[in-house]
Image (cartoon, helix red, strand yellow):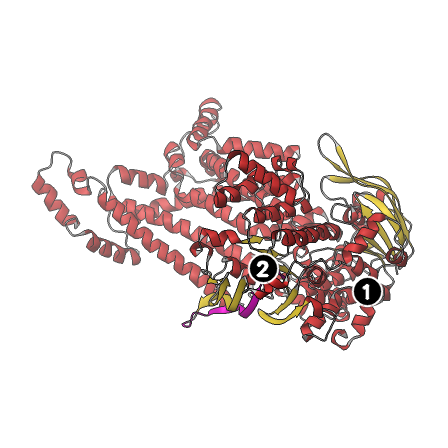
Amino acid sequence: MSAFLLRLVARRVGLALLSLLLVSAMVFAITAVLPGDAATEQLGQDATPEAVAALREQLGLGQSVPVRYAHWLGRLVQGDFGRSMVSDATVSELLSSRLPNSLRLAAVTAAISIPLALVLGILAAVRRGSWFDRAVSMGTVAIVSVPEFLVATIAVLVFAVHLRWLPALSYASDISSLGQMLRAFAMPVLTLCCVTVAQMLRMTRAALIDQLEAPYIEMVRLKGATGARLVLAHALPNAIGPIANAVALSMSYLLGGVIVVETIFNYPGVSKLMVDGVAQRDIPLVQACTMIFCAGYLVLVMLADLCGILANPRLRHRR
Amino acid sequence: MGASVDVRDLRVVAQSDQDEQVLVEGVSFSMRPGEVLALIGESGSGKTTTALALMGYARPGCRIAGGSIRIGEVEVTALDAAAQRRLRGRTVAYIAQSAAASFNPSRTLMDQVVEPVRIHGLMPREEAERKAVALFRELALPEPERIGARYPHQVSGGQLQRLMAAMAMMADPDVIVLDEPTTALDVTTQIEVLGAFRRVVRERQVTAVYVSHDLAVVAQMADHVLVMRHGRPREYARIEQVLEAPAEAYTRELLAAAHPAPRPSALTPEATAERALLEVRELSAGYGKVDAKGRPEQLILHDIELKLWRGQTIGVIGESGSGKSTLARCIAGLIEPCEGYVLFDNRYLARTVAERTRENLRRIQMVFQIADTALNPAQEIGEILARPLRFYFGLRGAPLRQRVAELLDLVKLPAAVAGRRPGGLSGGQKQRINLARALAAQPDLILCDEVTSALDPVVAAAILDLIAELRRELNLACLFISHDLHTVRALCDEVVVMRHGRKLAQVAREDYARGPHHPYYELLARSVPELRRGWLDEVLAQPHHAA
């Protein structure tokens, strides 16, 4: 078993690394063809061509694209993301101040949305066709079709402006107690949950219903099993593959897709950092952020794949 | 020990939002402890619904609407949900039709086999496992000590079916319900499984309800037979009486279908004087990586030789995995052979459909096994039949409609069917449409892949009659693939026996009764259940089946 499984895992990891390499090439290529570069951006429009040329030389922008890519990749492998072209700090320093914030926001959202989505999805599948199922289905469709900036804006209007329960902006820096953390996170997490819960819930429900209609479920029922046993011991293990995939997709969204939420609540996360980087043509920063998002996405999808493989004895044990 | 079963006026209905549809009505029977009752009927006759009702269970959307079901002293219809759960798996156990689909693919066999006693809290896990291993041994499963650690996909269909029997016997039930438990098995496997079932049922004196559409199988197992049709009982009698002096016309039809009479041949001496219409030479095919010599890793067909004349029907018989369907697909060009040739009308045929001329495509038509999946459910029958007519003959307008009507007439369906969709037709009607679509191309050769296997015996017999008539009228050559030796012998001029991708023997119609033939052919012939009591005992007494 283990040799086969190791080969399978090794192949998945290898594929993920290869994808990451391709992504790095694409990221670099795209940022290389973007109009305007850091030199013109830093010196402003009034700069003399000589000054721009000098700065370009200094920044190494004069070399050909493949050479610059090779250098960049070489440093990247060593964990060196380069130096920000705008602020004086290294990209790593900028990231290390922001990444924990983003991860904390993602972790809190995941901790709330995953159990909520799974429980609601399982209940909806078990009580398929009941008023509960219909309410959940309609609710998720309604929520998922509202764009997140609208959810966020309405949340601010209701909770911050009218009720005055929560601050309109979230500063991760002034969190010292649990109460403050709750106050700071409440609205961003609420907004993010709206999107992620709906996706995961619908996939969980669909995957479980698929299993509950299988003949082996009738067999278990005719052995005298209770409903709980039917679902938890029999149907759910067979639905883990698709559910894990849905969770991974939703979580990867939390990594990179929270730009709107971080911007609206002025939350100091990586997405916000990346938006600022784009605005200031801070290419190394943008490249680093993109690579981090892609890596996170690939890791999540790979984990979901491995979950699916481990949950499926047909893949786990080859005859 | 078994319990008595008494069913009175059982009524089961399917409920939609507005109306009720009666699935089963007026079914009554009673069984003494240890008796075996067979429920016989075609699909949709309500036999499975009746059997499931013994556990107080109706499929989703259905409910037991009336009547009484007594098992021992218990009135099943009066039980609440918790009491029903206590009944299921403990007092009444169930053996399902498709063992492959009825085991949870992600849990070990032992987990699932001991589950009934664990659910009902009858014994600790270690004791349950010991009991399971003893049952595995009794049911002649290989490696009884270790087979429990495997997963369902790691054992064969026949073994799964026996494992399900072990699962059913774990809680020592008073009644077991066997729902077509051998229908999905090959005949040689079926004998072993039937033998195991009967031993278990007899030794424990369990009351058993055996659901089947196969009278010959039932004759080996049952004391009484209840014949059902359209949800109502037709005949209820001792098995001997049903076999020897059936009272109902429908029962006689069932008996006749179980004993298919030979259909007249369409092969003429003039035809055989010419060259063969189809010649298969040294044909091999397979899948997987191709080595330097162009041979794939896994060969499914080895060096097949075959000749087929106009008007001739050759039956290809073999168990699942013998390569018989692959042979048809190679001839049709759906699978590319790795070696050998197919000659059609004295010309080499291109290997794949993509390379063949439209004329050659037209002249060889394939009829697939499951009409349900072969017909597009979104298209009307008229459109399904019109497509090949437009494609091959460019028919439009009135001639097209007229030809569609002719085709429907050819397969003995009313012209009004053209306006319906496949969903509105019965299984037999769909198979006729499937056949008509192949005939629309006016082929010289049709390849029939298990076309009667998914049908009820009476319906299948009608399809056989139709094929026999069509081949004579249209002078068709036919390659008829089936796992059922009875069917093949009734229809075909010659029988080709395949096993493990090789052609083992070819037996002509005149020689069916004259033997001995290839030992494997003899084994297959012996394994087909016969319509008399005691057949199973005779077969099991023979040395090959002693295990």
Mark 1 chain? B
Residue ID at (21%, 39%) = A35
- Which residue is disc 1 drawn over? B198
The foreground one among B53 and B181 is B181
B100 left or right of A187 in image: right
The residue drawn where x is 68% and y is 71% is B521
Question: What whole-number distance in Å separates the C-alpha atoms at marks 1 and 2?
Answer: 46 Å
Q: Which SS type dominates the magenta stretch?
A: strand
Total labels: the figure holds: 2
Question: Which residue bears the numbered disc 2?
Answer: B310
Label 1, secondary structure: give it: helix
In front here: A69 or B143?
B143
Q: Earlier in the sequence, mark 1 or mark 2?
A: 1
Residues in magenta? B292-313
Q: Position of residue A268 (x, y in %)?
A: 36, 39
B309 magenta-colored = yes
Look at the numbered discs 1 and 2 and tell me whether their residues touch, using CB distance below 8 Å: no
Q: Amino acid at mark 1?
A: Arg
- State whether residue B280 is above or below residue A187: below
- Single out the mark in the foreground, 1 or 2: 2
The picture quadrant where one finds residue B449 is bottom right
Label 2 residue SS: loop
Label 1 in the same subunit as label 2: yes
Which label is found at residue B361? Answer: none
Q: Chain of mark 2?
A: B
Outermost top residue? A162
Quarter that holds the C terminus of chain B: bottom right
